[in-house]
Image (cartoon, rainbow, N blue to C red):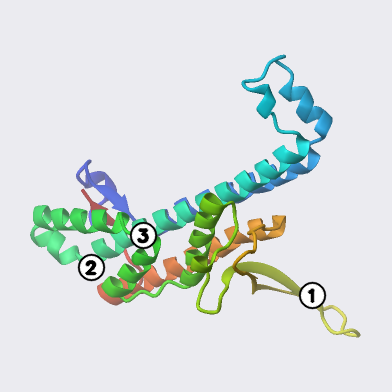
């Protein structure tokens, strides 16, 4: 592999390390912003809200002004929808990047033999993948690279929940549930297990565990603060599993200790 400085300036270096750093960093920023917004929402008082609302002495449509209770509910719903939408967009974009990297790994020989033709084919295939729905992206990974994405069902459920929140204000319908009649959220949470009584000098065991919450037709999707935050941990777990699978795919195809950076025009 040529040194990055010696490559064609139109080429883009793509590596699993860069992808993981980019998306895990973005996920941490999303998590921090969510924590900040949740903390800020706990400090808002009705008097301060009305003071800011009336600061300029006029409103766009005063008769539609929401009182404190109404704006609390509206703000909470907006925060939930935005959080879920951001997480899904990151998950889909991460799948897109990993799909491109897997294509490049698989096409190393073709890219060396006929770069123009190989890049054209890669561009067409990648463009088609990017346009796929989330569930179809998972199926494409399995079909093309034999990569099974862990937490696929969890992400599909999150995608369905966003549709429910956007279309029916969070009320679950029959078409939203699985064969068991449930729309299930899966959360990654931390559990602390204290040592048995009488045992000294032993630290509590900390482990990540799976929890779930099921909604049924007629239920309204309302997630607690900890559940909203735990969704980010679920996506982080999905990222780590995906990166490990891509790394294993690269080792299998290239027969090296780790997939090297790949380039695309």
Which residue is nearer to you in this view: 191 or 176?
A: 176
Camera-side mark, 3 or 2: 3
Q: Secondary structure at mark 2?
A: helix
Crowding around mark 1 (Cα neighbors within 10 Å: few <14, some 14 to 19, many 20+) is few
For the residues labelled 3 and 1, the Cα–Cα distance comes to 45 Å
Does label 3 or label 2 sit earlier along the sequence? 2
What is the x, y in percent for residue 51?
Answer: 78, 23
Against 244, residue 96 (above or below) is: above
Residue beneath disc 2: 106
Q: Residue furthest right?
A: 198
Q: Secondary structure at mark 1?
A: loop
What is the x, y in percent for residue 91?
Answer: 45, 58
Against 173, residue 61 (above or below) is: above
Residue beneath disc 1: 203
Q: Are marks 3 and 2 in contact (CB under 8 Å)?
A: no
Identify the mark at residue 35; answer none if there is no mark.
Answer: none
For the residues labelled 2 and 1, the Cα–Cα distance comes to 46 Å
Quarter where residue 260 is shown? bottom left
For the residues labelled 3 and 2, the Cα–Cα distance comes to 23 Å
Identify the residue at image location x=25%, y=57%. 128
């Amino acid at each position: 592999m040529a040194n990055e400085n010696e490559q064609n300036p139109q080429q883009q270096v793509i590596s699993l390390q860069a992808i993981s750093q980019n998306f895990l960093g973005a996920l941490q920023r999303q998590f921090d912003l969510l924590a900040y917004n949740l903390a800020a929402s706990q400090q808002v008082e009705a008097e301060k809200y009305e003071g800011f609302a009336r600061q300029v002495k006029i409103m766009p449509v005063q008769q539609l002004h929401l009182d404190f209770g109404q704006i609390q509910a509206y703000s909470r719903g907006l925060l939930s929808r935005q959080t879920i939408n951001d997480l899904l967009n990151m998950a889909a974009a991460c799948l897109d990047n990993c799909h491109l990297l897997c294509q490049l790994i698989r096409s190393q020989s073709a890219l060396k033999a006929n770069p123009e033709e190989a890049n054209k084919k890669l561009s067409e295939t990648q463009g088609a993948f990017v346009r796929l729905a989330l569930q179809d992206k998972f199926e494409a990974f399995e079909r093309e690279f034999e990569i099974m994405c862990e937490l696929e069902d969890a992400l599909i459920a999150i995608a369905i929940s966003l549709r429910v929140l956007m279309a029916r204000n969070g009320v679950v319908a029959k078409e939203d549930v699985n064969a068991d009649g449930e729309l299930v959220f899966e959360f990654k949470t931390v559990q602390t297990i204290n040592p048995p009584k009488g045992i000294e000098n032993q630290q509590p065991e900390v482990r990540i565990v799976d929890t779930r919450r099921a909604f049924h037709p007629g239920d309204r999707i309302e997630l607690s603060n900890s559940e909203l935050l735990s969704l980010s941990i679920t996506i982080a777990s999905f990222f780590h599993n995906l990166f490990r699978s891509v790394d294993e795919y690269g080792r299998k195809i290239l027969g090296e200790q780790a997939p090297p950076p790949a380039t695309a025009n």
